[in-house]
Amino acid sequence: MKSDRKMKRVWVCGSKGQLGLSLQGIVGGSKHRYFFTDVEVDICSRDNVEEYVRQNEIDVIINCAAYTAVDAAEKDKEKAYAVNHLAVENLSLVAEKNGVFLIHISTDYVFDGRASRPYMEDDAVNPMSVYGDSKWKGERAIEESGCKYIILRTAWLYSQYGKNFVKTMIRLTSEKESISVVNDQRGCPTYAGDLARVIYDVVERDDYEKTQGVYHYVGGGSCSWWELAREVARVAGNDRCEIKPCTTSEYPTVAHRPAYSVLDARKVQETFGIEIPHWKEALRKCMANIKKGE
């Protein structure tokens, strides 16, 4: 049987996003074979998913694909649910049918942000946006499919790739004399490179089937967006830019943002024996990589 072979065939969906690109950068030394696809394989089509899995004899699926435009999702509901729910349902049902293990990336937005302590994996969910609800429905589809899986919830993802808050702050604090940044939303900045390494290590361990379930992975510590912006400016040497704190009500958005979305990551640490760097340490590492790529 294919599940008994030592070299696994690992399919990464959403290969051109921050996490997918981060994974591509670290799998070169793997004992397994990785397949990376993006829009060329339509995961919203179950037939396409089935065909790809069968043709390539896939053992593990890592789903990095997601509709992450939080505000746009409020208007483009059909697409958000197609990518974050329907496609995930397709992947999980095909995984269950073919004995494939699924690793899926979810979000802090499944919670409502009203907590006063870090969210645990088994805390009640209450998504307050289309994005959050579509991601929660994706989680439920996996659990109901009967496939073997790991769901990793993460938050405030940034990297040297694509567009993200950190890269935007580097640019704005270098160009402007002052900016305003929200200071009443608290979360855990997470470097996609660190999350990619955790996923890679889980696959390399070969005992992931014994550790099924939902986990949280985020950078160590927590901060507000304003505190993150100040640290970005400090590391970048853009101290001349004044960064003013403002409230969510002063900077209204279409979609609801959780005021408090700090995730407790002790379970993933204890289960897989990993150390999670503090978000400031991870930020410096990422910004060094951004500078290398300039």
Image (cartoon, rainbow, N blue to C red):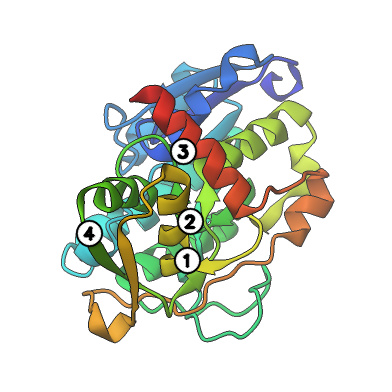
Q: CA distance from mark 2 to mark 4?
A: 16 Å
Q: CA distance from mark 3 to mark 1?
A: 16 Å
Indicate whether 255 appears above or below 142: below
Residue identifier under label 1: 227
Are the two marked residues, 2 and 4, in contact with CB atoms closer than 8 angstroms?
A: no
Kind of residue sitting beneath label 3: Met
Indicate whether 64 appears above or below 230: above
Camera-nearest residue between 6 and 2: 6
Instruction: Give the residue at x 78% y 44%.
Output: 274
Disc number for residue 231? 2
Give SS at disc 4.
Answer: loop
Q: CA distance from mark 4 to mark 3?
A: 21 Å
Residue identifier under label 3: 287
Residue 103 makes an appearance in the image: no
Give SS at disc 1.
Answer: helix
| On-image quarter of the C terminus | top left
Q: Residues within 10 Å of mark 4 (few under 14, many from 20)?
A: few
Residue 209 horizontal/vertical position (percent): 75, 41
Instruction: Give the residue at x 80% y 35%.
Output: 207
Kind of residue sitting beneath label 2: Glu
Q: Earlier in the sequence, mark 2 or mark 4?
A: 4
Q: Quadrant of residue 60?
A: top right
Kind of residue sitting beneath label 4: Glu
Kind of residue sitting beneath label 1: Glu
Are the two marked residues, 1 and 2, in contact with CB atoms closer than 8 angstroms?
A: yes
Q: Earlier in the sequence, mark 4 or mark 3?
A: 4
Residue 170 horizontal/vertical position (percent): 33, 46
Residue 107 horizontal/vertical position (percent): 49, 60
Residue identifier under label 4: 177
Q: Residues within 10 Å of mark 3 (few under 14, many from 20)?
A: some
